[in-house]
Image: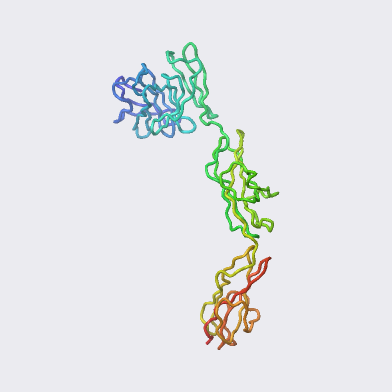
Amino acid sequence: MFGNNGTYLKIQIDGDQSSSTRDSVAQPVVTNGIDPASQGAYFQTKSGKYLLSGWGNWSCNAEQGHIGIVDSLTGVGKILNLPAGVLPANPKFGGDGNIYAFDMCNSKVIMVDPESGAIISQTVALPNVASTDTDYPFGAMSSNGKTYVVGGGKTGGLIIVDAYPEFKPTLKASAVVSGSGLQGTYLTSTLGTWKSNPEGNTTRQWYRCDKSVAAGLTAITAATKCLKISGATKTRYKVAVVDESKYLTVLVKATNSMGSTSTTARSIRVPKMSEPKRTRNPVVSGSASVNSYLSATAGTWSGNPAAKTSLQWYRCEAYVPAGRTSLNCSRIPGATISRYKVKTADKGSYLTVLVTAVNSVGSNSSTAKTSAKVR
């Protein structure tokens, strides 16, 4: 309750806490010289805090209105100073964590930031309730997330404030398509990030387009000349031969009971079909001595679709540089994996690999630089 000098005296803890009282705290929660007792002292538990009834100057002049909040564990309170000319009555925490109160000077329900005291939004005037009414309007947060405010006085009235306003999905972060676009590989898509109330569901559809598609479009336009890919509605899509030189994207649609919103991902271009080409030579490394192991890499290869590589070890009488497409050396039977154990038969020879890369368009080969002479 409050004293007439506007200082906080003690709190009776309500039913969901243990029944006890607190003595007056060191920090007053209302300013001296303002008597909020005429407004009553309504307490509401919210994560261990108590919300005190608002107060202000009844003449609705340029003075500020206030709402007090007290921590039930520490007894420390703070004042939210509202804009001038606002008289908050019966403030309550909404299900969204904001404070809802009735502005008696302006006959509006206001939503207040519990940290700063800023008015986030305000409704239209309460029906049939004028600022001259002498009785109080009362509010209550219901289980469905709506605040019911009843106006007092002879004329009375009722307004419902939606603490969780329903709205159709809005996009927060765009959908994304990622991958190389090479034929035979997979592209992966995300649904983007959405905000909506109530929650809804999202679907995706892959498209094949003649022109590039930007992220964040709300529809597939005729200008991009896109075709829906039948049955392609999953996260991943395997790039097909028919996709050559096309642009691939997804259209994501988010839907709830309030409506739907769509968005595109930035498209990825599928490269033109091409045979494998070496971009980095194979390499042989390790100790060229009997009973030691040599290791080989396949190098790297371009091409669309992605190439598959095979490897063959060779025994050569002379040094061979990297990048040859064929060898005049002796093939070592069964030596087709990346590691090779040097044998007595290799002594005095040079060892290397010939890597062959193959795709549906063609094939190419490349040698690694030979090892040192086997000793």
User: 226 or 233: nearer the eye?
Assistant: 226
Q: Tell me the residue at 37%/21% (across/down).
A: 85
**Whether residue 365 is situated above or below residue 11 in the rendered picture:** below
**Whether residue 105 is situated above or below residue 335 in the rendered picture:** above
Q: Is residue 27 left or right of residue 358?
A: left
Q: Tell me the residue at 31%/19% (across/down).
A: 4
Q: Is residue 279 left or right of residue 102?
A: right
Is the N terminus in the top left, top right, bottom left or bottom right quadrant? top left
Based on the displayed image, in which of its 4 quarters is residue 302 positioned?
bottom right
**Whether residue 162 is situated above or below residue 191 in the rendered picture:** above
Total of numbered circles in the picture? 0
Q: Residue furthest right?
A: 230
Based on the displayed image, in which of its 4 quarters is residue 316 positioned?
bottom right
Q: Is residue 239 left or right of residue 105?
A: right
Q: Tell me the residue at 51%/23% (across/down).
A: 148
Based on the displayed image, in which of its 4 quarters is residue 246 positioned?
bottom right
Residue 289 locus on image (x, y percent):
52, 84
- Can residue 83 be seen in this snapshot? yes
Residue 147 locus on image (x, y percent):
50, 26
Q: Is residue 255 left or right of residue 117?
A: right
**Whether residue 199 is situated above or below residue 57 in the rendered picture:** below
User: 191 or 342: nearer the eye?
Assistant: 191
User: 100 or 216: nearer the eye?
Assistant: 216
Q: Residue furthest top?
A: 154
Report the coloring of the rendering.
Answer: rainbow
- Can residue 15 be seen in this snapshot? no
Q: Residue furthest bottom?
A: 348
Residue 303 locus on image (x, y percent):
62, 65
